[in-house]
Image (cartoon, helix red, strand yellow):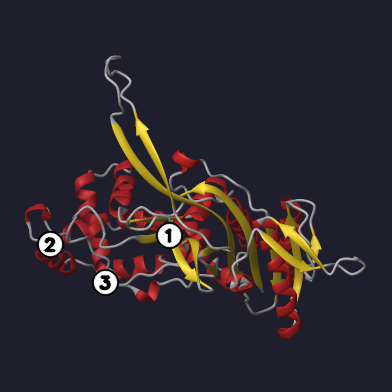
Amino acid sequence: MILELHIIQNFAPSNLNRNDTGAPKDCIFGGSRRARISSQCFKRAMREHFKENFSAQENLAERSTRLVEEIASQLEQAGKDKAEAKRIVETALAGIGLNMSKKDAEKTEYLLFFGREEIRKFTEICLENYDALLEVAPPDTSEMSAKDAKKASKAGSLPQVSKTLLDAMDGGRAADLALFGRMLADLPVKNREASSQVAHAISTHKTGVEFDFFTAVDDLKPEDMAGSDHLGTVEFNSACFYRYANVNVEKLRENLQGDEELTRATVEAYIRAAVEAIPTGKQNSFATHEKPSFVLATVSDAGKCSLANAFEKAVKNEEWVEAENGSDEKKVKREGLVLNSIEKLSGHYERINKIYGDNAKSKVYVKTNDALTRGLGTEANSFAELIDATVGAIFNQREA
């Protein structure tokens, strides 16, 4: 079962996702410059939304290079010496092939995405095998070279403890980990394939970059001194974005170890996060918190289809379209980037379905304007109604 989300969202002046020069990210699509927000940026915002709103907090994950610090802190709460506990955890992790950074001995080599339940199990295993790990743990490695410390940690690993730790790495039924997956370069056997895909958001129309010139004045400056104490510029744009995401519900269920109730809660939370989460870039400067103008949720047995090509030809603020049947006019003018983007998407979706077939089991959408829509299924009265209808279509069918 595949859940797909198609979203039209218009942002006022903003810089939600910057490139290495500080400018809003962009790309070329359909031969013209478009504004872009990366999938990584939106996924980060969605994971944060999960943390704040997901009901089953124990079924979440943490992505960090500070796993040793976290587990050592939990061991300290159990009465162990903090410095000693760190050596224990480093030894345990090295035993399964996860080592500390060569540049910063306090951190792992790269970000590790671990479920909170996995972290709890790791702590328990270290606690149960504390004396054995302490016996083989290398001495304080602060004065040793990174290479020697790595060798010492590997030499002190315990096969049985390592096997227990590896067995505990089952994803911990963490909802966000089950959705977005994880890659462990040194431990590929414990990689987790993502059940969700999120596309880069692109503007439906041509865009450019504008500059905001600003000044800052010293509040304690003497009154007889004129001028500003700081001058600067911030780059920004304003764009109407098409956003696309999907979830393979069967893969999600598998990642969550067959827990049907948790799978259902995760799907509902995912829809909410995809629609409600907004990146945090430059928000204190622009306060860009616009809700989507259009959301289409479809459910099908198989197959995925982004509708990005509806905007291969950049949308214009004014578009002349064929008049509806019964009208005396042959063409009518439609105004507004948001409205025209929704109508372009609707027309493209209808044409795609005529050619390739429409296998959707459920199609529900909401919109905030009077855009002409056809072939999009049922219009819901609210976002809450869209969620209920979509989640029901996925899980009621399975129960039947």
Query: In the displayed structure, would residue 301 be above or below residue 99?
Result: below
> Residue beneath label 2, please?
146
**If you read the primary sequence from the N terminus, does the residue marked by circle 2 or circle 1 appear first?**
1
Q: Secondary structure at mark 1?
A: loop
Kind of residue indicated by mark 1: Lys
Query: In the displayed structure, would residue 245 be above or below residue 272?
Result: below
Q: CA distance from mark 2 to mark 3?
A: 23 Å
Q: CA distance from mark 1 to mark 3?
A: 47 Å
Density class for disc 3 (Cα within 10 Å; few <14, some 14-19, many ≥20) is few
Q: Residue furthest top?
A: 223
Position in image of residue 395 (x %, y %):
72, 66
Kind of residue indicated by mark 3: Pro
Identify the residue shown where x is 50% and y is 57%.
42
**If you read the primary sequence from the N terminus, does the residue marked by circle 2 or circle 3 appear first?**
2
Kind of residue indicated by mark 2: Ala
Q: Quadrant for residue 268, please give it.
A: bottom right
**If you read the primary sequence from the N terminus, does the residue marked by circle 1 or circle 3 appear first?**
1
Lateral position of residue 75 relative to residue 319, left or right: left
Q: Secondary structure at mark 2?
A: helix
Q: Quadrant for residue 320, please give it.
A: bottom right
The residue nearer to you, when weighing 392 against 71, is 392
> Residue beneath label 1, please?
25
Query: Does any portion of residue 57 appear in the rendered image?
Result: no
Q: Residue furthest bottom?
A: 355
> Which quarter shows the C terminus?
bottom right
Q: Nearer the viewer, mark 1 or mark 3?
A: 1
The residue nearer to you, when weighing 257 against 13, is 13
> Which quarter shows the N terminus?
bottom right
Position in image of residue 267 (x %, y %):
63, 61
> Residue beneath label 3, please?
159
